[in-house]
Amino acid sequence: MTRHRFALTIPAAMLLFSANAITPIDIPATYLCKAVRLTQEKNGRIYSKGFQVQQLYLKFTHREVSAFGTHSKISVCRKLGIRYFTRDTVYLEDPELPFGHSELKLYMLGDTIMGNVNLFDKDTSEVSVKVIVKKIPVLRDRELEQLCQ
């Protein structure tokens, strides 16, 4: 008898087991990050850390998603291209990774953006991220981008 192993990524498993429906990510829009949970596999071990943030933002345009602001006195300024998006999924493109690398994508479930890409660091291998967000008015958008130095 042959046993089959099915591997689900953490975001896919969360989507399957969630009773809530996926909601669309507004594009263009800017979101204030309130809390982050980052899970990553390195050298065969799984590391997970969660932290609250006060001045960290995600901005979605039709061409890219930007993470900018400060976290623990560290300046964050990361941009990823958007290959395409559907109503509920944003497919990303990282210029530092080979094309087609594991289909980098983000979903939105209620007030949480989830995905398989590290929005805050260049190490995106075997990663899962959950970010609790709050949409902010576009009026503050330009002044907040100055946080990206």
Image (spheres, grey):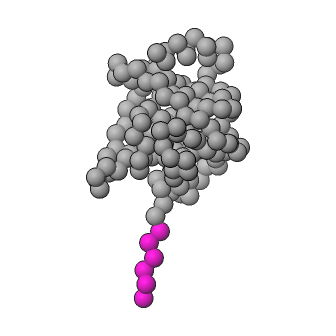
User: Magenta span has 123?
Assistant: no
Above-or-below relation of 41 to 144? below
Q: Main secondary structure of the magenta part?
A: loop
Above-or-below relation of 79 to 69? below
Name which residue lies at 42% across and 88% down.
1
Above-or-below relation of 87 to 13? above
Name which residue lies at 42% across and 36% down.
122
Above-or-below relation of 127 to 36? below
User: Which residues fall within the magenta stretch?
Assistant: 1-6
Q: Is 24 left, or right, of 38 in this rendering?
A: right
Q: Is 110 left, or right, of 115 in this rendering?
A: right
- Residue 63 in the image, given as x and y percentages of width and height: 66, 32
- Residue 13 in the image, given as x and y percentages of width and height: 50, 57
Q: Is 90 left, or right, of 14 in this rendering?
A: right
Quick check: can you spot residue 23? no
- Residue 36 in the image, given as x and y percentages of width and height: 43, 35
- As drawn, the residue found furthest toward the right would be 87
Q: Nearer the viewer, residue 149 or 107?
A: 149
- Residue 31 in the image, given as x and y percentages of width and height: 58, 27
Q: Quadrant of residue 84?
A: top right
